[in-house]
Structure formats: structure tokens, C-alpha cells
Image (tube, rainbow, N blue to C red):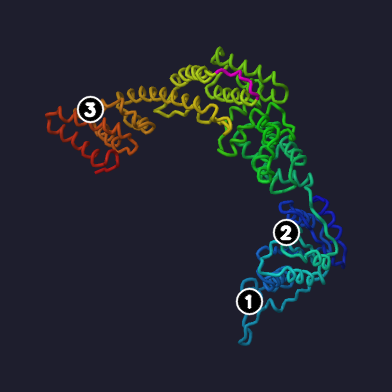
Amino acid sequence: MNQEEIVEVLQEKFSIVNSNNRIGLNGEWGIGKSFAWELFKKRLKNKEESSNELKVIYCSLFGIENINTLKRELKRKKLEQDERYGKVAASGKYPAIKMLGDVLSTKFLGSTIDLLEMVSLEFGSDYLICFDDLERTSDSIQISDVMGVIEQVAQSAKVLVIYNDQEMRKKTEDFQRQKEKILDFEYTLDSLSEQVIEQIIINQKIVLADEKETLTKFFLEHGKNNLRTLKKLTSYVQELKGKVPLNRELINLCAAVFLEEMLNRSEEKELTDEEKSKAELNPLLEYQKYKINYRAFSLLDHIKNYLVTNKIDPTLFDSFVNPAEKSKIVLLMDQFYEGILSSKYVIEETISESIQLLKTGSANELSEDYIILLVADMKNFNNLFNLKLVPANIDDVALERIKELLEKNVLHKEMLSGRFNSTFRKLSISNKKFPLVQNLLSQSKQYEEQLIKQLYSKEFKKRFEEENYDECEIILNKNVNLIADHLYIFDNLAQPCSSDYFNFIRNLLENTTIDSIVKKQIRQALFGLKRKQKDIVIVYRISLVLKEFLNGAYGKAKKN
């Protein structure tokens, strides 16, 4: 039964006047038993007021340590439902009763009276008492004692007991006999209704009709009949939506990755050698049951990697969602995954086309990060199917093209005072493919760093000649060891100089990240400059800087 069916049954059973129906609601953790109860209460509240209106009391047994605590909680809630108590407490005429919820006792003729002891556990057929979380009762209390209280309450009121039968049997072997003695009916919640799934998805802020329909359909077909799973899944998709564009195909892929990587892994059985071999040969095998469009599989590794690194490249998803904007290199990457679902011939042709693109493709067809991703795919599929089509020098070919693109893009890119983001900063490569391009990526980053250093150096020299020392400091904060190429800046200490320049030099020498070799070069430059001076003021100025630098243990801040 699902939530809607359960609610209909509860409405029917508990609507019978002068009847004390005792109902048990069983279900696994996370299936939505408490959600069904809340839905039932909401339906009760929406009904027209009538003389037969139920007075509802909810009591969670989670953490209840002893029977006395349970009884007092029931009595307290009974009083809260009593209109007479509400009127008396509101009048203020009887402070002891008004403070009952806080004090629970008062002094009368010199003796202390526990007011709650005077309250009966008899309710009436117009009361519905819900006992939730039966299996979460503290180990310090006997289940038979709890069931005894429930039976006592059920003598005069309608009762709903919510529990996980499987967990209850672990707590007590006698549970079956106990519930048969007390309960009139037992129903099992074992599925989620479509209405409930839609409501949960809407509550998670996914309100677009297409997205709601996609997630609802996916969960009904592949879900675990678990509200917690649904909430986590929906939250995960919503999180990704805030970072990358998603269409119907990608929502399905994201949901499949979540179920496989975040949930199924914890439940996965030990694979046989044959199953492991098949999984290694075809990494998409485990996802075939989700019927994902092959085009979406090109982003599978990037979504998996996001679960581990929290990093993802939105441009890849832009290209997928807007196919018209796809470059030749992205289309080839898609084609690899088409090959897995079609034939070996498609993969062979795709590798050949990829090699040709790297060798002769125009700059408009290539990008630095996509070249690395393409090489990773080429090597991966070449190894998987033992094709021997990828030449041994493919990294060299790829690196030359990457260098061409970096020279074009980095050196001609406008940069404000050293603020520059690496081309490879958002590159996302799966752990499986990373070793295949680790060397290529490392060499590409090194070359980019060389180009950026040249750009920084040029910009620093320009700002220094303009006496814009604030901008100089910003650039050096990006790469303080750049100073090794600009030791001439200390020459101004031998000339009349501004306070801005002098403070810039002192702040620079206080930087704790200066490399030891660079520190040695700075020290030699300052000593050499000092030896050449005859003016006592200039000698003092240079000596002051040297003293701060040396006393600061080569860069530890030590201001006057």
C-alpha cells in the first residue's frame, strides 16, 4: 500500500463513531510512515467541523526511558486537548493549574501534590492517540510494558501504532503475539504514491513541470520506495541545477549516478571475476538499466567526479544542452560513447578522426582543456578494446597544439594586475582516466605557468615604472618569487625615494613565502648595493632594510 491508500483506510476506520479501532501501521525506515500520518492529519483538518471531530494526540516513543515518563506525557497532552483546562489556565484564577505544563506539582495544606497523578488515562472514543517510533523506544524499557500502556489507552480511545516490524522482531521475539493481542488491523506501507513523490519534489524547490515529471517518472521506475532517498536525490539534482544547465536527459543521468554511486554501492554484493571483467570492459553496463540516451553518457564521468570533488565544468553541460554550439572535439567525445552502444567500428573511426583533428584541426575547433579530455577518451577506449590505434607520441602531438592555443589565449588575454585564472582550473577528469593524461596535464600546466610568469613579469615592470606600487604588490602576492627577475627595484634605495616606494620594499621583504634561493639573491643584491655607496644617509637606509630582512629570518614579518 502507498500513502494515499493508507490515508483512505485511516479515514474510513477512524470515522466510525463510538468505535475504538486499534490499527498498526508497519513499514521500513524511510518509507514515509510519519509522512502518511501528517497527510492524514491534514485531511482531518481540512474536513468540515462536526460534533464528531476527533481530538488527535501524537506521542513519539523515541527516547522514552520509562513507563512513568510515557504516562505523564500522555496525561499532559490530554490536558492540552481539554477545553476546560484551556479556559481555566487562561483565566489565571488557579496559578497551580496554569503552571501545570511547567511545574507539574503544587503545595496544598503543607503537602506536595503531583497534579498529573490526578489525571486519568481514560480518553473517549472521540480521541485518536498515535504512538510513533515504537522500535526506537529506549532499551531500558520493556516493549511489553509499552504495549501494556497502549492497550490501556485503547480501552477508551482510537489508537494508531506506527512501527518497523522487522526492527521490532529484533528487539523482542514476542512482538507478533503482543500486537495480535492489541491491534484490530495491521497495514503495511511498502510503496510511495505518485502524489506523494510529486509533493516531495515540489517541497525540494523543483517546481518546473518538465523537471517534476522527469524526476517523478524516474523515481517510480528506479527508486527504492524510500522518502529519504527521494529527498536526497531531489536535493542533489537541485544542487547541480544551480551549477550547470540540465535538461530531461541530464536529470535522468544525474539521478542514475546518485542511485548507483551514493546508494547502491553500500548495498552492492561481491562481484564474481566474470562480472568484474564485464564491468571493466564496459563501464556503462551498470547504467544500461536506466535507459539513458547514449549522448548523455559523455558526461557520466564528470557527474561521478562531482560527487567526489564538488567540482564541475558548466561549459561541458552548456555544449550538451545546446547541441548547435558543439565543437568538433565535443562531438567526437560524444561519438566514443555512441560506439559502446553500437559497434567497435564506430570507436575505431572516432579514434582515427580524433588523431586527425589533433594534428590538423583549426584553433576554432580545439581548446586546451578539451584536448586533454579527448586524449583521455582516446587512450581509455583504445585500452579497453585493445585496438592499438593511438600512436605512442600522442601526448607530444597534443602538447604542441595545447602550447599553440595557450600562446594565443594567455599572452593576448587582458590581465588586471596579475589576476589570472588557470585554463585548467575547472578541468574534471575521473580517477580512472586521470593516470592516462597525468603527464600531459602536468606539462600543459607547466607551460601555462611559464607564459603567465612572462605576462606577470611584463605587467610588473610596467607598473613599477609608473610607480604604482600598490599594483606591484598585488602582482607579487600572486607570485612573490617573480622578484628574482626584477632585482633592479632595489636600486632606487640608493636614490632619494618616496615613502610609498620605501614601504613597498619593506612589505615585500616581510613576505614569508619567498623561496630560500630568492632570499639569498635579494641579500646579495642589497649587500652589493650598500658596498657601492658613500653617502651615509643612503648607507643607513639600505642598512635599515637589510637589518629588518635579516632579523626577520629571511622574510618573517618584523615591523618597527
Q: Secondary structure at mark 3?
A: helix
- Dot 3 amino acid type: Asn
- Dot 1 amino acid type: Pro
In the displayed image of the protein, which residue is found farthest to the top? 360
In the displayed image of the protein, which residue is found farthest to the bottom? 109
- Dot 2 amino acid type: Glu
Q: CA distance from mark 2 to mark 1?
A: 45 Å
388 in magenta: yes
Q: Quadrant of the C terminus?
A: top left
Residue 249 lies left or right of residue 176; in this view the side is left
Q: In the depicted view, which residue is nearer to us: 340 or 505?
A: 340
In the image, is residue 482 above or below residue 176?
Answer: above
Q: Position of residue 214 (x, y in %)?
A: 74, 36
Which of disc 1 and disc 3 is earlier in sequence? 1
Mark 3–mark 1 CB contact (< 8 Å): no
In terms of image quadrants, where is residue 504?
top left
Q: Residues within 10 Å of mark 2 (few under 14, many from 20)?
A: some
Q: CA distance from mark 2 to mark 3?
A: 80 Å
Q: Position of residue 144 (x, y in %)?
A: 75, 70
Magenta-drawn stretch, dominant element (helix, strand or loop): loop
User: Which numbered marker is on residue 492?
Assistant: 3
Q: Which residues are magenta?
A: 385-391
Residue corresponding to mark 1 = 95
In the image, is residue 404 above or below residue 301?
Answer: above
Q: Secondary structure at mark 2?
A: helix
Residue corresponding to mark 2 = 167
Which mark's residue is nearer the viewer, 3 or 1?
A: 3
Residue 456 lies left or right of residue 12; in this view the side is left
Q: CA distance from mark 3 to mark 1?
A: 85 Å
